[in-house]
Image (cartoon, grey):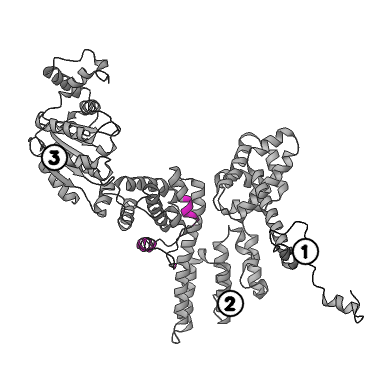
């Protein structure tokens, strides 16, 4: 039954004071309870509910009818007070009702919750008359409480106490389902099977007035077929945590993050319904393998529907945040910055490709028109163009005698005034000797005009707050080990703590680049030198974990070297392999078979050649 039809049935149930029992069955997380609560609140506020008192009892963990009765008493409120702040005055009338209906009035307020007082519990239970009662989570009841006993009490509430009772449950999870079904028809008047569509579930989880991120999640959730309201809400909450960290980047980075959190969050929170995390981290939807199962092929098509093709380091970092319940800002920024740059440069490349196509794909366009398109495109996007792109365009315009050739060099120099690596000629696809003298001089002049680099102390002190900015990372990695030693020894207290925290943050980066590896390696060497100065400095240095990281890296390299040497020895000495082929049953003192004599040795014995 759709949500709309279920709401209509609930409205009809609430519109009369007739005592009856309504049963709403459906899977966990589909919004049964939310829909019931919302319709009751809406109808109550509109004055369309004749019965004026309401109680809601969750059976989660309850083991007796006495606990249910106590739960009903404690949760009873006026229908008009649903979803409103707690008001002690509401209970004054409730206690008065109990007193008027029983001569077992509570002897003291502080004992009416005493589980051992059966008389008091029964007195409390007398208040459950002419009211609406919701019994939820029957499938989560305690082991000592039978479903048929709950149905019996519900029947008593409806027949003897003139109550309207709604029973909410996931009958597929009932342990005593057969016995329960046998009694259900005798008790329940109206049955509803709650089966909302994926669109309705997404709408329950994130109402229609949601922001762009909410609507984005709803779209992904619908295509994936997420059928649990709580899962979608958890995903929404996680996206709300991470999206503020991405506001400085291309919106495509945010879209990718929301897509990943929706997909990986679904797998993490609802593994029985979603593709496994292991599958998501390995899958490549661009291609299908011959041994892929039918289920994997279905998942592949599902992933393609949300434009998910393969997992990357950013996805792994987001998965860590899903598991932890929070996102590490520095590490998110590291990956987001790379994705942002890739996205912007990708768009710029597409624009430039269109300009080149305009140049190439015609024999009729004059030079000023074809070159003009390239020039204007570069002028608009020069901040995202590489030095290789720039010198190629300078060469093209120069060969065609276009006076704007050198402007490409000037535009590039202006756009990269603060980028120390922008004028490294070693990174050119075209090597330096192919550049004209004028181009080389202009690039050298632009590099000379760059702002002074940060001092070593400025670099180390910037690690804690700016530790993933390119100029800080590249500059710190370029410093010699001696500067690391000096900085660690010359700073104390807060400055020392900033340097240490800045260095140690790289230990938790999932996929560090070569600069971060270099920084940690140099820091470890410096700390080893400091640790050798005294026993106390050794304890101070070893607690940081940086030396241990380098120890592990060096050990791995050494092991790899030994393995390579063994492999090389085996490949050059075939007799080593032949020894290993001796049957296991052979005695240990059995000599190996004699090696075949070489041709050189045979010649020597025949007197025709001397043995070398």
Q: For this view, does 374 lie left or right of residue 239?
A: right
Q: Residues within 10 Å of mark 3 (few under 14, many from 20)?
A: some
When the figure is inspected, residue 15 is found, relative to residue 128, above or below; the finding is below
Crowd around label 1: few <14 · some 14–19 · many ≥20 (10 Å): few
Q: Residue at image x 26%, y 33%?
A: 59
Residue denoted by label 2: 395
**Magenta stretch contains residue 96:** no
Q: CA distance from mark 1 to mark 2?
A: 70 Å
Q: Which residue is mark 3?
A: 188
Q: CA distance from mark 2 to mark 3?
A: 86 Å
**Dot in front, 2 or 3:** 3
Q: Is residue 10 left or right of residue 558?
A: left
Mark 3 or mark 1: name the one nearer the start of the chain.
3
Element type where label 3 sits in the image: loop
Q: Quadrant of residue 57?
A: top left
Which disc, if any, is residue 592?
A: 1
22 sits to left or right of 295: left
Q: Residues within 10 Å of mark 2 (few under 14, many from 20)?
A: some
Find residue 525 and report its horizontal and vertical position in percent: 70, 46
Q: Is residue 517 visible?
A: yes
Observer-nearest residue: 179 or 535?
179
**Magenta span of residues:** 289-317
Q: Nearer the viewer, mark 3 or mark 1?
A: 1
Above or below, 305 relative to 60: below
């Amino acid at each position: 039954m759709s949500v709309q039809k279920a709401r209509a049935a609930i409205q009809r149930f609430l519109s009369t004071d007739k005592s009856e029992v309504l049963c709403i069955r459906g899977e966990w997380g589909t919004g049964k309870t939310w829909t019931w609560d919302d319709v009751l609140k809406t109808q109550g506020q509109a004055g369309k509910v004749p019965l004026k008192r309401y109680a809601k009892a969750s059976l989660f963990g309850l083991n007796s009818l006495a606990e249910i009765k106590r739960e009903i008493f404690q949760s009873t409120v006026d229908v008009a007070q649903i979803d409103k702040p707690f008001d002690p005055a509401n209970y004054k009338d409730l206690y008065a009702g109990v007193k008027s209906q029983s001569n077992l009035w509570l002897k003291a307020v502080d004992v009416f919750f005493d589980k051992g007082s059966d008389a008091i519990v029964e007195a409390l239970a007398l208040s459950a008359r002419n009211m609406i009662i919701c019994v939820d989570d029957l499938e989560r009841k305690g082991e000592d409480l039978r479903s048929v006993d709950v149905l019996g009490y519900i029947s008593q509430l409806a027949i003897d106490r003139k109550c309207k009772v709604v029973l909410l449950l996931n009958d597929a999870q009932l342990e005593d389902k057969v016995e329960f079904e046998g009694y259900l028809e005798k008790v329940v008047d109206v049955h509803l099977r709650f089966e909302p569509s994926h669109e309705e579930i997404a709408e329950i989880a994130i109402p229609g007035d949601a922001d762009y991120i909410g609507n984005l999640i709803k779209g992904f959730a619908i295509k994936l077929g997420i059928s649990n309201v709580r899962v979608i809400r958890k995903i929404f909450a996680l996206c709300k945590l991470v999206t503020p960290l991405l506001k400085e980047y291309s919106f495509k980075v945010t879209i990718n993050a929301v897509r990943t959190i929706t997909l990986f969050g679904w797998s993490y929170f609802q593994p029985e319904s979603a593709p496994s995390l292991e599958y998501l981290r390995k899958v490549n939807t661009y291609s299908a393998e011959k041994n892929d199962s039918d289920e994997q092929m279905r998942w592949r098509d599902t992933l393609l529907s949300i434009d998910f093709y393969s997992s990357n380091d950013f996805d792994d970092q987001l998965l860590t945040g899903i598991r932890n319940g929070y996102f590490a800002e520095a590490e998110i920024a590291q990956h987001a910055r790379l994705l942002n740059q890739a996205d912007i440069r990708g768009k710029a490349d597409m624009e430039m490709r269109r300009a080149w196509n305009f140049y190439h794909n015609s024999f009729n366009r004059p030079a000023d028109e074809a070159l003009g398109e390239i020039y204007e495109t570069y002028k608009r996007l020069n901040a995202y163009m590489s030095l290789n792109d720039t010198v190629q365009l300078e060469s093209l315009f120069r060969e065609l005698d276009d006076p704007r050739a050198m402007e490409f060099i000037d535009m590039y120099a202006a756009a990269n005034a603060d980028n120390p690596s922008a004028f490294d000629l070693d990174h050119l696809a075209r090597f330096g000797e192919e550049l004209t003298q004028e181009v080389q001089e202009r690039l050298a002049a632009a590099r000379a005009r760059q702002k002074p680099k940060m001092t070593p102390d400025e670099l180390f002190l910037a690690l804690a707050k700016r530790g993933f900015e390119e100029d800080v990372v590249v500059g710190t990695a370029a410093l010699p080990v001696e500067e690391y030693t000096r900085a660690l020894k010359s700073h104390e207290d807060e400055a020392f703590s900033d340097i240490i925290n800045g260095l140690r943050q790289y230990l938790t980066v999932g996929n560090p680049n070569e600069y971060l590896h270099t920084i940690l390696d140099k820091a470890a060497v410096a700390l080893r030198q400091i640790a050798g100065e005294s026993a106390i400095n050794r304890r101070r240095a070893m607690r940081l974990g940086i030396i241990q990281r380098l120890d592990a890296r060096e050990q791995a390299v050494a092991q790899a070297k030994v393995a390579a040497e063994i492999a090389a020895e085996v490949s050059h000495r075939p007799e080593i392999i032949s020894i290993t082929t001796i049957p296991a049953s052979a005695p240990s003192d059995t000599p190996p078979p004699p090696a075949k004599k070489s041709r050189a040795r045979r010649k020597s014995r025949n007197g025709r050649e001397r043995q070398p």
